[in-house]
Image (cartoon, rainbow, N blue to C red):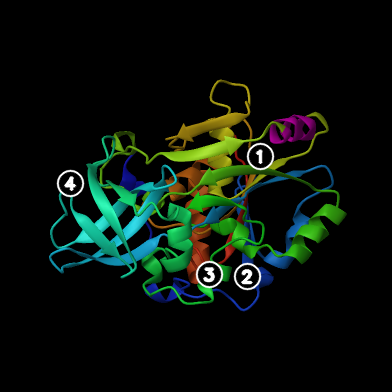
Amino acid sequence: MKVSEFDFVLPDELIARYPLHERGASRLLHVDGKAGSFGDRTFADLPALVRSGDLLVFNDTRVIPARLPGRKSTGGEIEVLVERVIGDHEVLAFVRASKSPKPGAVLRLADAFDAEMLGRDSTNDDLFHLRFDPTRTVLEWLEAYGAMPLPPYIDRAAEAADSERYQTVYARESGAVAAPTAGLHFDAAMLDRLRAAGVEIAWVTLHVGAGTFQPVRVEYTEDHTMHRERYTLPPATVVAVAACKARGGRVVAVGTTSLRALESAAVSGELRSGEGETELFITPGYRFRVVDRLLTNFHLPRSTLLMLVCALGGQDVLLRAYAHAVAQRYRFFSYGDAMLIERYDG
């Protein structure tokens, strides 16, 4: 398929650069892929759109403050964005500099500690392998001196409030450098309302990488290579999914990251617990094995995530829904409004 089939015009003023005052105050566009229709709701309506016996699967990854300013030994300014923590003292990272530092170079980060450049990553030439000062762990250095890695389209520096708002209320497993943004709408009260309605809750962990924001630079979708992301699927979640299916409930992925973890763990045809890495690229024509419904935010034009939602809900109805969202002034992207998509198996 041509990537241009997933394009749309988005006015800049519809990009949400700040969150709403309350997590659950967003709008919700309910898209029924089976009926080919959509309707305007609010996120507060979510308990009315699920039923007892459904299963919501959340991604409990925690965003790390992965952005660090720095300088080369020559004095040139750099910026380091950690993509993946690969040990107590080592990371893979994007390094923005006028001239890329060479292996052996020492970088001064946040004017607080040093990191040694070990070289480029063998599997991704865009990433650099760095070793941080071993007197603290990587996560300790980041918690002390890093900034939240807001997406590039937010187009502002992270502020103090982002440390809390660019993080789900249930985040617990540190390792992501981008938030699983569908989860940002939930507060404790909404989780309690869903449980009271008889909805079950289960967990996956997928550490979202900065590659989620990388543009698709090819003309055809089949020529695109996805970035790798780590995930963990607990045995309890496999049991919960099986029980949900057996009682006739629906598996609702909260966010594209939860969906990709579930579908990646079922590529053999059977959902299996454990840890793994996924490069699963879901485009129209993909046959879903696990997920029945998806709660998600609105995604970038020509992005892999827009292709994913089109695969789930039907390309025609999703693109019409996006046009409706633009016309109705929905708020887009990480701090924006939400969609609930019913799977279309056409």
Q: Residue at x 68, y 69 (%)?
A: 24
Label 4 Cα crowd, 10 Å radius (few <14 / some 14-19 / many 20+): some
User: Is residue 244 one of those drawn in magenta?
Assistant: yes
Q: Which mark is residue 26?
A: 2
Q: Which mark is residue 103?
A: 4
Residue identified by numbered label 3: 163
Disc number lying in front (4 or 1): 4
Q: Which percent across, then down, holds residue 268?
A: 55, 20
Instruction: Please tell me whether mark 3 or mark 2 is closer to you in this view.
Output: 3
**Which element carries disc 1, helix, strand or loop?**
loop
Q: Position of residue 220 (x, y in %)?
A: 29, 39
Magenta stretch holds residue 251: no
Which image quarter is the N terminus in?
A: top left
Is disc 2 surrounded by few (<14), some (14 to 19) or many (20+) residues within 10 Å?
many
Q: Earlier in the sequence, mark 4 or mark 3?
A: 4
Alpha carbon distance from label 1 to label 2: 23 Å
Measured Cα–Cα span from mark 3 to mark 1: 32 Å
Mark 4 or mark 2: name the one nearer the start of the chain: 2
Looking at the picture, which amino acid does disc 3 mark? Ser
Location of residue 343 (image quadrant)? top right
As helix, strand or loop, the secondary structure at mark 2 comes to loop
Against 321, residue 125 (above or below) is above
Q: Give how far across and how far down residue 107 sits, in percent.
A: 24, 59
| 295 left or right, relative to 197 | left
Of the image marks 1 and 2, the number of the one nearer the N terminus? 2
Instruction: Identify the residue under disc 1.
Output: 292
Q: Which residues are magenta?
A: 236-245
Residue 313 visible somewhere in the drawing: no
Question: In this orientation, does residue 53 appear?
Answer: yes
Mark 1: which amino acid?
Answer: Asp
* Foreground tag (3 vs 1): 3
In space, the residues marked 3 and 2 are separated at their CA atoms by: 20 Å
